[in-house]
Image: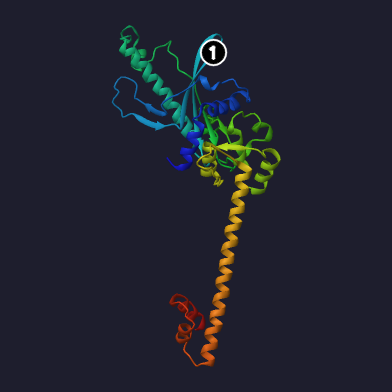
């Protein structure tokens, strides 16, 4: 897992941030999903071959984050599986990726249900179809909702549905082809109103990313709308890894004032550049003076260049450089 993948996963794994993402996407920002209702699950999607022979090799893929939501619905507890896929660049096969992970999760549920039936020896009283599938007529699956979150300022120009990825000229065929659409949150396409629907640091992180490609717009946003914005270590790690924000947090501190950190970085960069220019100018001036002195000695005392440089106590390294200019 790369640096950006690790940073985004650690950030989104926090229950308050995870819940905020789905509340934004499903409920327009209303805090319907509470962080305490979430339980982290194993993100490995293992599809065991279900059916009669069970001889095929299992397929394993890893979703970035998977959590179970236990919520009350009509007085009954309802369970939903929520997954997040963090994208640090546009994924041009995202619909297939999402469809595969969701299918693997459903296949896993079928296998788990079938295993329970086998352990309880319930297949014997069932028809051949239920026996072969391992899944009984009254069995039900938990719904799976996956959300792709883009951590790049780029416009998402990749496909958002399976239909966009296939080439079918026959409308009748396309109409019967099952589609799969991804659920996507991308900063480039969010407006100010939408950013206001977030209630965790996720909104600030995504808005920072949105403006990160234009430093002038970024500083305008910070100074005008977020002059006192602070961010913690996980947020800073995401911004540094995904958009090279160059924010730093002191070891003894847990958060940083974003405006001040950026201004400090800019000032330090200017100071460093100034020192480098000064050093370069000083070296050039010194070299020009040495060169002129060597020429004077060569002309007035009939010395060779090496003799003149030695008389002036110029170092061998500088002498070599001066000789190249005298040729």
Q: In the current view of this chain or complex, which residue is farthest to the right?
A: 224
Which one is in front, 159 or 61?
A: 61
Q: How is the image coloured?
A: rainbow
Q: Residue at x 55, y 47 (%)?
A: 246
The answer to whether residue 276 is above or below residue 248 is: below
Task: Please rate how many residues cluster around mark 1, counting C-alpha atoms within 10 Å: few if below 14, some from 14 to 19, many from 20.
Answer: few
Q: Residue at x 47, y 18 (%)?
A: 142
Residue 133 visible to an observer of this rendering = yes
In the picture, the quarter occupied by the N terminus is: top left
Question: Which percent across, then down, holds residue 170?
Answer: 54, 34
Quadrant housing residue 219: top right
Which one is in front, 96 or 36?
A: 36
Q: Residue at x 69, y 38 (%)?
A: 225
The answer to whether residue 84 is above or below residue 132 is: below
Q: Residue at x 50, y 37 (%)?
A: 8
Question: Which percent across, then down, holds residue 89?
Answer: 52, 42
Query: Tag 1's secondary structure?
Result: strand
Residue carrying label 1: 72
Q: Is residue 281 left or right of residue 65?
A: right
The count of marks equals 1
Q: In the current view of this chain or complex, which residue is farthest to the top?
A: 125
């Amino acid at each position: 897992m790369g640096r950006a993948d690790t940073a985004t996963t650690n950030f989104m794994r926090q229950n308050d941030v995870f819940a905020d993402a789905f509340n934004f996407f499903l409920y327009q920002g209303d805090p319907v999903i509470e962080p305490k209702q979430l339980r982290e699950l194993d993100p490995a999607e293992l599809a065991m071959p279900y059916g009669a022979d069970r001889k095929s090799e299992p397929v394993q893929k890893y979703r970035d984050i998977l959590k179970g939501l236990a919520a009350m619905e009509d007085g009954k507890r309802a369970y939903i599986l929520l997954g997040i896929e963090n994208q640090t660049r546009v994924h041009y096969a995202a619909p297939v990726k999402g469809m595969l992970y969701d299918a693997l999760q459903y296949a896993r549920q079928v296998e788990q249900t079938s295993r329970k039936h086998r352990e309880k020896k319930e297949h014997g009283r069932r028809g051949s179809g239920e026996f072969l599938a391992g899944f009984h007529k009254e069995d039900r699956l938990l719904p799976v909702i996956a959300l792709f979150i883009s951590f790049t300022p780029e416009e998402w120009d990749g496909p958002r549905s399976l239909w966009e990825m296939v080439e079918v000229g026959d409308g009748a065929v396309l109409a019967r082809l099952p589609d799969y659409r991804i659920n996507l949150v991308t900063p480039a396409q969010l407006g100010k109103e939408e950013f206001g629907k977030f209630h965790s640091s996720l909104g600030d992180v995504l808005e920072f990313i949105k403006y990160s490609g234009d430093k002038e717009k970024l500083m305008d946003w910070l100074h005008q709308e977020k002059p006192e914005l602070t961010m913690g270590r996980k947020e800073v790690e995401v911004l540094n890894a995904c958009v090279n924000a160059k924010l730093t947090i002191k070891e003894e501190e847990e958060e940083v004032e974003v405006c001040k950190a950026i201004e400090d970085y800019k000032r330090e960069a200017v100071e460093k550049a100034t020192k480098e220019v000064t050093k370069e100018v000083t070296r050039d001036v010194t070299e020009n003076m040495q060169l002129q002195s060597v020429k004077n000695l060569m002309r007035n005392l009939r010395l060779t260049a090496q003799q003149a440089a030695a008389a002036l106590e110029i170092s061998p390294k500088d002498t070599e450089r001066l000789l190249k200019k005298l040729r």
